[in-house]
Amino acid sequence: MNGPRNSLATLATLVALAALTFPIAALAQNTAAPIVRHTFEESDGGWTVMGTGGKISVTHDAASVKSGKAALQFDYNVNKGDMAALMLLTPDGMLAKAKSFRFAVKSDSGGVLTALLQEHEGGRYIAMFTVPAGKWQQVELAPSDFTLSDDANDPPDPDGKLDLDKVEAFGITDVMQILAQTDNADLEKLFNVKKGQHTLFIDDVVINEEPLTAAIQPDVLDTFARPQVGWFAIGGVSVSQVSGAPLAGRGIQLDYRQSMGKPVAVIRKIQRGTIAGKTGLSVDVASAKPAKLIIQVEEKGGGKYNILVDVPGGKQLKTLAFPFTEFKEADDSHDANGKLDLDQVNQLVIIDGSGLLGMEEGENTLWIGNVKVTAGK
C-alpha cells in the first residue's frame, strides 16, 4: 500500500508549485456595487497571462459564452517547460473588503483547477476545485475557502493569515500543468494528465463585499454548500455534487472502477490549525458495493495517520466516527516526532483501498457527506 500513499504524498509538493503567483476571480448576486465585475462584453478587463505557453483573448463564439455575447478565453499548454496562469492584478488594497468571489468556468478537458490569492510580500493562498469537461461550472468562494500554501517553494507569510488588504493579484491555473513537469509517468497516469494544448473559458466574474449566503458551521470541514466540488480525485474517479438519498443531505458522489493495484481517492485541503484541539473525525458514507476505506489525515511535514474501515454495499448509509487516538501512522509516513500533531494537519484523504487489497473488481459508486471534527474530552 506504500505505492498509492507515496503518490498521494507527492501532492503536497505539487500543490505548492501551483502557487507561483496565480490569483482568482468571481461572479455576482448583489445589491451593492461589486468591487470587480467583468462580463468581457467590451474588453478583457485587464486580465493577463503569467508564465509561458499561454495566451488570452475575448471570444464571441456563442458555444463558448456563459451569458451575454462574450467570454474570456485562456489557451495554454500542458507540457514540460510550459507553465501559465490567468491573472488579474488587484493593487492598493482593492480587495480589502472582499467577502465573495464568483465566476463561471468551462474547461475543455475537465480536472482540477487552482484559484490563488497572492499577498504583497506575503503568503500564497489557494482554493482547489474540480470541474467537468465541456460544461460550465459555477464557482463560489469565500476568503475562508483559501488555505495557505506553505510548502518548501512557497514564500513565508509573516502572520500566517490571509490579509485581503495586502492581496496584489488573483488568478486561475490548471493543476495538470504542474504535474506535467514531473517526468513521472505513473503520477501522470494516476492524475489522468492530458498533455497538449487546452482551453479555459471564464465568464461573469464578480468580487463582492457581500458574503456568500451559506453560513460557516463550526467543526464542519465541508458543508457542500458551494456549487463546485471542493475536493479533487485521483485514479480515474468522476466526482460530482449531490443531494439526498442515500445521504441525509448534501455531499459528493464518486463513480469509479475498483481494480487490482489501482488506488482511488479524494482529497480535501484543510487550513493548517483548523482541527487543532479536536478529538475525532466523523464522515457519512454509502457505497454501492462493499469497500475498504482508508481515512487519512496528513500533516504539512509529511506525517500521515489513518484508519481502515469496512463499508457495506447496498447504498447503506453509515456514519464513520473515530477518535484521533485510533489513527495509526502510515507505512510511508515521514514524521520527525512519530506522533499525530493536529495543528499541523493540512489535508484529509479518503481512499477506497478495495483494489489494493485484492477485493472483487468492478464499477462502484461511493457517497460522502457530513464531514466534521468533534471536540470534547
Image (cartoon, rainbow, N blue to C red):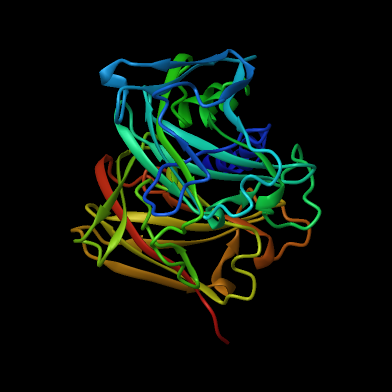
The residue closer to the viewer here, 21 or 128, is 21
The residue closer to the viewer here, 286 or 160, is 160
One can see residue 302 in this view? no
**Image quarter in which the C terminus is found:** bottom right
Residue 227's place in the image compared with 328, above or below, is: above
The residue closer to the viewer here, 315 or 197, is 197
Is residue 6 shown left or right of residue 313? right
Residue 71's place in the image compared with 311, above or below, is: above
- Find residue 339 and report its horizontal and vertical position in percent: 70, 65
- Find residue 207 and report its horizontal and vertical position in percent: 50, 45
Residue 75's place in the image compared with 179, above or below, is: above
The residue closer to the viewer here, 54 or 30, is 30
Residue at 58% over, 22% down: 48
Is residue 345 shown left or right of residue 61? right
Quarter of the image for residue 202 reads top left
Residue at 53% over, 37% down: 114
One can see residue 291 in this view? yes
In the rendered image, the residue lying farthest to the bottom is: 377
Quarter of the image for residue 205 reads top left
- Find residue 239 and report its horizontal and vertical position in percent: 33, 43
- Find residue 46 and report its horizontal and vertical position in percent: 56, 25
Residue 18's place in the image compared with 207, above or below, is: above
Residue at 50% over, 72% down: 219
